[in-house]
Image (cartoon, rainbow, N blue to C red):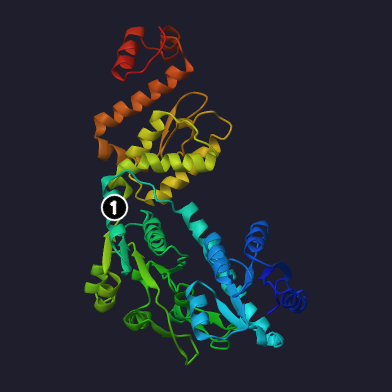
């Protein structure tokens, strides 16, 4: 392993000789920054992107190295910290580890350069894993926000708040928001412990038994063709956190037994490795199928189902909780437009009437992204910006174009008369915005002023006389 020369190591020791020795040993591989006491350490830390701190336990100051450790961990709870001391007292070592140190080394062993480098590499590897996890968490938060106003979703999230560290099974159609609910459960657990809680994800659909085993439990170098290094499995990366197993209903039956064994005692083996390891990660499983139906058909183990469904939630489709469409739509309008861009009421009306069977929130997100791109140079989003798969107007002549599949669904849902009224209202609303005079408009569309007045009044559309 080649160390990253950009990694910055903060050395805090009141003995200038120790600082000098460590700087000499480490400067070839790392950027070394020194501090001699608590205040100096905290100020220095605030000015630099520190990857690792090495702290003397006993500082000749009002505050010890343990005080520095606690403050650094408060400022950055993922920062790896090594403690340094002349003593190897077991109570001190245990105390340091309990307070969050990742390692403890005696000053008497500083002459063993290889051991020092190995310990630093291990600590930095943890730091890299933490950063990777935090990056993934940020991506999840941005792409899968928890947005809702419906009573159904409020009740689900309230129930999620009540569970402690039980395994969770989340069921629902594709795109209904299973991932955001899983992330919400993860964030609640992190807040309860006030610490970093990994959230690691795997999609079980389409993976072979060997691939799923290797991904879940890791593998040794040479375990199979292409295994050129030892690899940690996701259950190891998710230790002290959550492993989110998406589409768990599609898991290879041969892997279900091994997952059940892991759930029973937390023990597993990397592929090709006889060593038994342990992880305490919680499983949050999700599926777009009814897992009980698969159990009854013999496609999914009943005992595994019961272990995964210690707490079980069903997320309704978007068409069953239409109160959530508006806040979700507005969230993505702001995200893709860069600000809270106004939109006409008929845009929301169209979205509220659409059934979203092709992908629920995911489909809504993509539809909003399309119209935001199309409306980029306009001040307001209107029907002309919608994808033709819903409704849109020809900008030049005002003709309405209706997708046949969407029309059929809407007619069935609304009834024919209501559907026709809705189309007429949208046409008149569009024409009223383009032609401010009733007389001018009646001449253009070849109808009487009285008929137009009656229709505008019926649909509560404001227009000049």
- The image quarter in which residue 120 lies: bottom right
Q: Is residue 94 above or below residue 147?
A: below
The answer to whether any part of residue 88 appears in the image is yes
Asked if residue 407 can be seen in this view, the reply is no
Q: Is residue 275 above or below residue 260?
A: below
440 sits left or right of 61 in the view: left
**Which residue shows up at 37% across the image and 83% down it?**
258
Q: Which residue is mark 1?
A: 316
Which quadrant of the rendered structure holds the N terminus?
bottom right
Percent x, y for residue 133? Answer: 52, 65
Q: Position of residue 346 (x, y in %)?
A: 39, 30
Q: Residue furthest bottom?
A: 274
Q: Residue at x 54, y 85 (%)?
A: 89
| SS at badge 1 | loop
Q: Position of residue 301 (x, y in %)?
A: 27, 78
- In what quadrant of the picture does the C terminus appear? top left
């Amino acid at each position: 392993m080649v160390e990253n020369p950009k990694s910055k190591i903060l050395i805090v020791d009141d003995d200038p000789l120790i600082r000098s020795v460590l700087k000499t040993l480490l400067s070839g591989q790392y950027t070394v920054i020194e501090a001699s006491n608590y205040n100096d350490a905290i100020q220095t830390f605030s000015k630099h992107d520190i990857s690792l701190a090495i702290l003397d336990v006993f500082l000749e100051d009002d505050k010890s190295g343990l005080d520095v450790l606690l403050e650094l961990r408060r400022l950055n709870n993922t920062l790896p910290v090594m403690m340094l001391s002349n003593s190897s007292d077991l109570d001190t070592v245990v105390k340091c580890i309990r307070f969050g140190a990742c390692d403890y080394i005696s000053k008497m062993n500083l002459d063993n350069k290889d051991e020092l480098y190995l310990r630093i590499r291990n600590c930095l590897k943890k730091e890299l894993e933490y950063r990777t996890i935090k990056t993934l968490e940020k991506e999840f938060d941005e792409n899968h926000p928890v947005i809702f106003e419906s009573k159904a979703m409020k009740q689900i999230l309230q129930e999620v708040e009540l569970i402690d560290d039980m395994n969770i099974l989340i069921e629902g159609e594709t795109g209904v928001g299973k991932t955001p609910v899983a992330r919400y459960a993860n964030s609640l657990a992190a807040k309860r412990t006030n610490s970093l809680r990994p959230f690691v994800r795997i999609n079980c659909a389409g993976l072979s038994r060997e691939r799923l085993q290797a991904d879940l439990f890791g593998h040794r170098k040479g375990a199979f063709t292409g295994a050129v290094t030892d690899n940690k499995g996701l259950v190891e990366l998710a230790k002290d956190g959550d492993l989110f197993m998406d589409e768990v209903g599609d898991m290879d039956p041969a892997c279900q037994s091994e997952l059940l064994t892991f759930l029973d005692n937390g023990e597993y083996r990397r592929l090709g490795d006889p060593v038994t390891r342990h992880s305490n990660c919680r499983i949050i499983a999700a599926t777009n199928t009814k897992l009980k139906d698969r159990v009854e058909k013999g496609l999914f183990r009943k005992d595994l189902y019961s272990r995964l469904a210690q707490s079980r939630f069903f997320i309704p489709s978007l068409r069953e909780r239409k109160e959530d469409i508006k806040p979700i739509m507005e969230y993505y309008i702001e995200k893709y437009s860069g600000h809270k861009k106004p939109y006409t009421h008929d845009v929301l009306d169209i979205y509220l009437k659409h059934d979203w069977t092709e992908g629920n929130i995911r489909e809504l997100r993509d539809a909003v992204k399309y119209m935001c791109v199309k409306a980029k140079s306009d001040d307001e989003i209107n029907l002309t910006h919608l994808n033709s798969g819903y409704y849109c107007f020809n900008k030049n002549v005002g003709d309405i174009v209706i997708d046949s599949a969407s029309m059929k669904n809407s007619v069935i849902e609304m009834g024919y008369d209501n559907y026709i009224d809705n189309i007429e209202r949208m046409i008149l609303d569009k024409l009223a915005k383009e032609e401010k005079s009733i007389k001018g408009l009646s001449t253009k569309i070849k109808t009487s002023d009285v008929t137009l007045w009656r229709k505008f009044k019926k649909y509560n559309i404001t227009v000049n006389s």
